[in-house]
Image: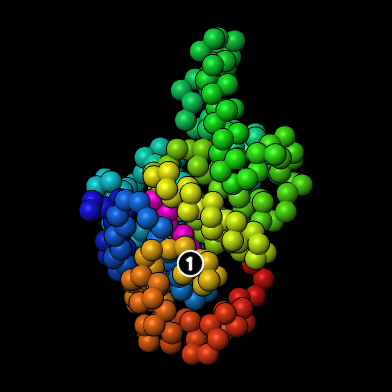
Amino acid sequence: MSTSLRLASLSRHFGGLQVLQEVNLELSYGGIFGLIGPNGAGKTTVFNLITGLLPPTGGRIEFNDQDLAGLKPHEITRLGIARTFQNIRIFKDMSLLENVMVGLHAQLKYGSLGLLTSSTLFRSEERRARERAHELLSWVKLEGKAADKADNLSYGEQRKLELARALATNPKLLLLDEPVAGMNSIEKVELMVEIRNISKRGYTIFLIEHDMRFVMGLCDDVAVLNFGRIIARGNPDTIRNDPQVIEAYLGREDEEASLDASRGTT
Ligand SMILES: Nc1ncnc2c1ncn2[C@@H]1O[C@H](COP(=O)(O)OP(=O)(O)OP(=O)(O)O)[C@@H](O)[C@H]1O
Ligand SMILES: [Mg+2]
């Protein structure tokens, strides 16, 4: 199977702090891939490097066999990588529909040209974008609130709105940083179904999560990052039973309890 994303000897330090050390990871197309590991292991840094928010201090990132070195975040978005953030980033003063339209406008050919605002071409593109935004909101079951202000959403709904906006950039690879943080258990189960459906539509999903029930129930393939190094990779059963993973992250007793205790507020 061909490779969607390849991290080769990827490293990043901040001053003397070695946050990622020669990380090698390949993701094939399709599927739902999970990255887990203790707080501070370097998981979000992996996403920050992939999306061009930070340059690596060593190694390479390839997407569809293209080296991403030196590309700006918006160029990486255009190549087909979208993300959500651990700390939600949405426009709270705008409606849900407008939030998703922002993502879509990055794709519109004529969207930013004021001169064309009255042209038929612009109007038909705008109409298509609006329809697409409604469709993406329906994928995360938020279409009924399309006209509401984003500020009025619950925390879990805000996370789903951010996901819909990420989808609006028409990605092939979707990076989700702690998609269920702050959600209640019903919302988590719903999001699991929604992500599975999104995956079936052909998107490759790469998610970071601390909720083990969610990760193990959703992902086909999981990697464990510990102190900036990948210590295990495999299907959920393999990971669950890996002694090194249990030692480093899952804990020796009740994994949920030990995770909750290590977690603090999000
Ligand atoms: N821009 C930065 N400048 C300096 N240090 C940073 C920066 N970004 C991350 N770090 C440090 O790198 C380490 C890894 O951070 P990162 O956010 O990648 O961890 P994480 O695995 O996502 O943790 P969590 O599960 O708590 O979100 C931490 O010690 C963090 O303080
Ligand atoms: Mg993080």
| Highlighted range, magenta | 204-208
- Against 221, residue 126 (above or below) is above
Please name the predominant secondary structure of the magenta segment in the image: strand
Question: Quadrant location of residue 235?
Answer: bottom left
Q: Residue at x 60, y 50 (%)?
A: 160
- In the displayed structure, does residue 119 sit left or right of residue 236? right
**Secondary structure under the numbered disc 1 in the rendered image:** helix
Q: Position of residue 120 (x, y in %)?
A: 54, 9
Q: Nearer the viewer, residue 34 or 194?
A: 194
Q: Residue at x 64, y 59 (%)?
A: 187
Question: Quadrant location of residue 148?
Answer: top right
- Against 198, residue 45 (above or below) is below
Q: Residue furthest top?
A: 119
Q: Is residue 206 magenta?
A: yes
Q: Is residue 69 visible?
A: no
| Residue annotated with mark 1 | 217
Q: Residue at x 39, y 82 (%)?
A: 241
Question: Quadrant location of residue 102?
Answer: top right
Q: Is residue 21 magenta?
A: no
- In the displayed structure, does residue 70 sit left or right of residue 166? left
Count of numbered badges drawn on the protein? 1
Amino acid on which the number 1 mark rests in the picture: Gly
